[in-house]
Amino acid sequence: MNPAPAPEVLSAPLVVEFPFTRSLGPVQSAFLTGLRERAVLGVRSAGGRVLVPPVEYDPVTAEEIRDLVEVGTTGTVTTWAWNPAPRRGQPLANPFAWVLVRLDGADTALLHALDAPGPDAVRTGMRVRVRWAEERVGAITDIACFEPYESEPYESEPYESEPAPQAAPHSGEFADPVQGIVAPARLDYVYSPGRAPSRFIAALADQRTVGERCPTCRKVYVPPRGACPTCGVATDEQVEVGPSGTVTTFCIVNIKAKNLDIEVPYVYAHIALDGADLALHGRIGGIPYDQVRMGLRVEPVWTEGGRYPDHYRPTGEPDADYDTYKELL
């Protein structure tokens, strides 16, 4: 087939999001529970330095640290950067400064947000204090942010020249300690698939599956990436494949995915479409999950208005011989 004119390169906003659940050891548990109780705890290392946020192992000796101390809720900005356009999930909705704050009694700095009217109101060496969240649950967000704090004037660069106030020993014991946290992880980005995948997606909208043939090894790759993964040369020749294909291998899914309206168990398979030299992914339907097998011949099922096959179902043909698809496993 002759090379087809490239369609407009597509792009779309995408979000990858999942909850990350972790248990807490005694040090992190005490730190987060302390925040819930409006106290900031750190640890004292073997060398006598007070580390805030606390760590469980000495960064110098790698020995376990359990010597908890309480530091102040006021401190000094050691460095900062202005954030003019806060994003979703950040501490403040209005423009703010990211700051490293060395709390009184600590030898290291804590990263958080500073609520300030503008960058001209922020400076290295300024004094700040914790603004506590109204509702505290045992998380770093229990510190809503820092805010400017007018205290006794310091000498120039106090965070380097003046000794820190002493931190007070703390048992780390609280009623109903926090034992674990759920931290949502989220990535927002704009994805552009490029010319070859854009052509592939455009063909799917017409219920066709199109790959690209390598001019050197003559293999047809579906979905196309614009270059042969084996030879490393550009691919441009369009080749329509399928629509039927062969299940090369598969798995049975037993865990229901959030926002996916498919009842478990179901089968997800690698399918080598006729004429393709690379298997693609697809869900298998129209057959009990425990009857899906390698070599099963399948065809796509399109829903009205769908831009890609909803699933693949058996064609009723005899199973493909293993030798015809063994190189595509």
Image (cartoon, grey):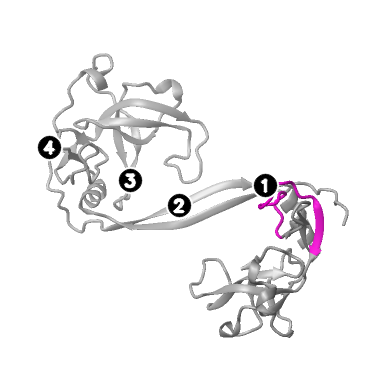
Q: Secondary structure at mark 3?
A: helix
In the rendered image, the residue lying farthest to the top is: 156
- Label 2 crowd (10 A; few <14 / some 14-19 / many >=20): few
Mark-to-mark CA distance, 1 and 2? 22 Å
Q: Residue at x 73, y 66 (%)?
A: 306
In the image, which residues are magenta?
Answer: 222-240
Mark seen at residue 284: none
Q: Is residue 320 left or right of residue 70?
A: right
Considering the numbered disc 4 on the image, is that residue within a helix, a strand or a loop? Answer: strand
Overall secondary structure of the magenta stretch? loop
Kindly identify the amino acid type of the residue bearing the numbered disc 4.
Answer: Ala
> What separation in Å lies between label 1 and label 4 (alpha carbons)?
54 Å
Query: What separation in Å lies between label 4 and label 2 (alpha carbons)?
Result: 35 Å
Residue 203 colored in magenta in the image: no
Q: Is residue 262 visible?
A: no
What separation in Å lies between label 1 and label 3 (alpha carbons)?
A: 35 Å
Identify the mark nearer the N-term, 4 or 3.
3
Check whether the beta carbons of the residues at disc 1 and disc 2 lie within 8 A of each other.
Answer: no
Find disc 3 in the rendering and name its residue: 140
Q: For marks 1 and 4, give the one nearer the viewer.
A: 1
Mark 4 or mark 2, earlier in chain: 4
Which marked residue is nearer to the observer: mark 3 or mark 2?
2
